[in-house]
Image: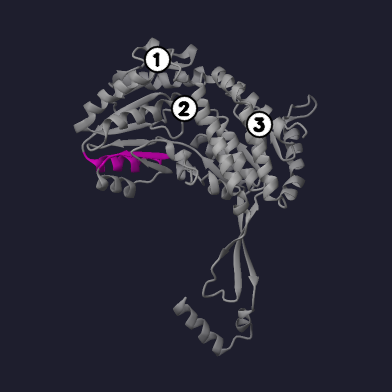
Amino acid sequence: MTAAVLAMPETTTLDAEVRRVFEKQFDAAIRLRRSTADERIAKIKKLKDCLLAHTDALHLAMEKDFRKPAVEVDLTEILPVVSEAQDAIRHTRKRMKPQGVWPTMLTGGLKGYIQYEPRGRCLIIAPWNYPVNLCFSPLVSAIAAGNTAILKPSEMTPHTTAVIVKIVKETFSEDEVAIFEGDAATSTALLALPFDHIFFTGSPAVGKVVMAAAAKHLTSVTLELGGKSPTIVDETADLDLAARNILWGKFTNAGQTCIAPDHVFVHESVKAAFIEKASAALKASYGATDAEQSRSPCLSHSVNQRHAGRVADLIEDAKARGATLLAGGSVNVADQWVAPTLLTDIPRDAKIMSEEIFGPVLPIIGYSKLQTVIDEINANPKPLALYVWSKNEDNIKKVMKETSSGGACINHTVVHYLHGNLPFGGVNNSGIGSAHGIFGFKAFSHERAVIRTRFMVARIFFPPYSNFMKKMVQALMKIV
């Protein structure tokens, strides 16, 4: 196939080149409406095989971009895409078939069904924190649904983006899948176009910009955003398991995960024990000293110095306002390094209490009444995830009934993302729409309502309107 990577000709402006490719995908989008399941599956298989063939290159690229451990690359970047691809390979044929629905009392004589049709030309804007996963996973869904796509990866992970570009170049022609590198100017040029669907992963602030741009063309959107995902550990929780699991969810990818536990509320009766177990788990996982942790093969670094500095500022602000440093706290901005950090006794006016941390810092907050925690969660924007650690079913039910979040885990963290049969997405400030599996397929599809006539019952309602018809309508209003 022809190359899909787009190097800007010197005489061609960015806007013109973006529009050229966008217009080129118009005919392909029409053609792909007729694409078969076999054709879509073949493209997904080719993408999966090409991704796996570049595993070593991705290990090296992510080591250069933020020193991500190879095992973490496999677990959090490549495996989710492979899983998404395998799900699409197994189920695309079934998902493409019209889905019959039962008639209602008002639609006798009619056959109704839902036809899933491609939305058309789609834009996928991927973030830097999981650049491979969050670029290719939605692409699998877009292909399965029969769309064209233009990808915009992050400029903040240049080595990884170079491999992503290579994979796209080797797998697709630009009339079906193209990719544009660049900064915010590239995103702005793309967002000016009337795409049929936009799939964006990133911060709520930028998500609002994307949604505003989409509104100009009434383009549908899927927004996977973020927020401060809270964790609750009550007095009945398995503290050993909770501490180890929460730290794993928090410190993976140096905390640069949209569904990472942002902060943890711990019942005062077990707070001291939880802190002791969390401190021990931190040392066992990553090393007992700052020097050991900085050399740990299990810890990523911040994506750049600016982000390392931002997290360092949050730590220093909390300490200056009276927070207690339990572990970590050291920062080397030049090396993009922030030690895994535990804080407690954090005042409410500390910046870390209102800003999404997106770094390896875990605030531990004591509580006495569960309702107080629920009230605090509800007073803030709805989070992308919420985690509850408890053996008390009444407490679990209370939290689940009285709060709202994109997803939730009970006695676990972050793994709901890997469950391909569940919708993944946020709610309000943390996102719009959902992805993965059938939900990703639907996100990139229009559910077209179709009626076929078997026999024409509606003829009895044709004008001229009679008293008999009036009585019939009145009777229907009582029984439907």
Residue at point 77%, 41% (across, down):
24
Foreground pick, 50 / 475: 50
Residue denoted by label 2: 256
Please name whichever residue, 44 or 5, is drawn nearer the observer in this view of the structure: 44
Res. 13 image quadrant: top right
246 within the magenta span: no
- Between marks 3 and 2 in the image, the one whose residue lies nearer the viewer: 3
Q: In this figure, which residue is indicated by the disc labeled 1?
A: 293
| Secondary element at tag 2 | loop
**Residue lying at the far left of the rendered structure:** 269
Earlier residue among tags 3 and 2: 3
Against 72, residue 147 (above or below) is below
Most distant residue in the top direction: 291
**Do residues under tags 3 and 2 come within 8 Å of each other at their CB atoms?**
no
Mark 3, other Cα within 10 Å: few <14 / some 14–19 / many ≥20: some
Q: Amino acid at mark 3?
A: Cys
Q: Nearer the viewer, mark 1 or mark 3?
A: 3
Range of residues picked out in magenta: 369-391
Q: As shown in the figure, which amino acid type bears the numbered disc 1? A: Gln
Few, some or many C-alpha atoms within 10 Å of disc 1 (few <14, some 14-19, many ≥20)? many
User: In x, y percent, where is residue 35?
Assistant: 71, 50
